[in-house]
Image: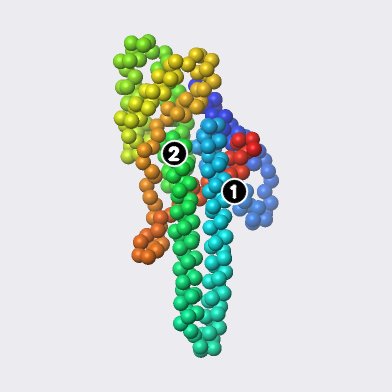
Amino acid sequence: MKKADMTSSKKIALLCFACLVMIPVTHCGAEVKDHFKFRRTLSLISGLELTGKQVSQLLPILQEAVEEKEKVEKEIAEAKQNSIDLYESLKNELRLQQPTEQTETAANRSHGLVRYLYNVKLVDVLLKYESRIDKILTADQIAYLMKFDSGDPIQGLNIVDETKTRSYDLMESARSMSSFDYKRNIYKSCTDFLESCIHDGLIDKETINMSSEVERMVSLLNRARELSYSAYKKSMEELANELCPRCNQPRPAEYGTQYFHGSPTRILSKTSRILFTKTALEIIKGMTGT
């Protein structure tokens, strides 16, 4: 199976990317920034090689995430304006040498609310959607996102391609085995598949439950062997994607330099910040044809 035949979603994304490159960019700073943001988002989504099923599952999650994000951002904007107004009042009191404890306390509380909304509430809201997305993605796709987050996306671009190629090969091998050989070798074949992916850095060993993954893969291959040739060819892409390992652990938590009530606050990964945007939402909508 050639890599170019694997996912229709990647073809769509690459076609969009090719068309984008042809669009002339003006020297207007805002337009250049928007152009770069679109290209970066499209590059990230293209590298995931989402299947049609994954795209349809991802769309409503992104829609909800963007809507909730906008609600919290509205809260932040209102809190910021209130904080500015209070600090202006405090500045005037200081200028008149008549500062009041009431105004100072209100200004400090308002500043604390802004920090809470931005560093805690907004992140918590989006982490909830990151967790939902991780349940849709395969372990190799999550490994790709983590590689992208590390600042080395080029090295991570082959992760999804390679894992799916191996999934196709395993399915083809399973279907070609005799019943006797299949029963004797299939558990070892699935174990070898997972161990090779771990050894080659395609998936993270800490996120995989080997025994449950082997059982899941064998069950899937049993189903693939029962399909007729035409039904198998029609569903190959989805089957190969399902065969890719699944994570049983969330991504490692990331913490920044901000503290709230004495505890470090979690931060959102770079890739999630890219995905939970209107730009990403429009790209995913385009891939669904909506």
Q: How is the image coloured?
A: rainbow
For residue 209, what is the image quadrant?
Answer: top left
- The reply to whether residue 190 is in sight is yes
Disc 1: which residue: 278
Q: Residue 276 location in percent, x, y?
A: 53, 48
The alpha-carbon separation of the residues under discs 2 and 1 comes to 22 Å
Residue beneath disc 2? 135
Disc 2 is placed on an element classified as helix
Looking at the picture, tell me which residue is in the foreground, 263 or 199: 263
Q: Are marks 2 and 1 in contact (CB under 8 Å)?
A: no
- For the point 41% across and 62% down, the residue is 258
Q: Position of residue 92 (x, y in %)?
A: 55, 83
Q: Residue at x 55, y 71 (%)?
A: 82
| Nearer to the camera, 42 or 279 | 279
- The amino acid type, in three-letter code, at marker 2 is Lys
Name the spot of residue 184 as percent of width and height, x first: 30, 15
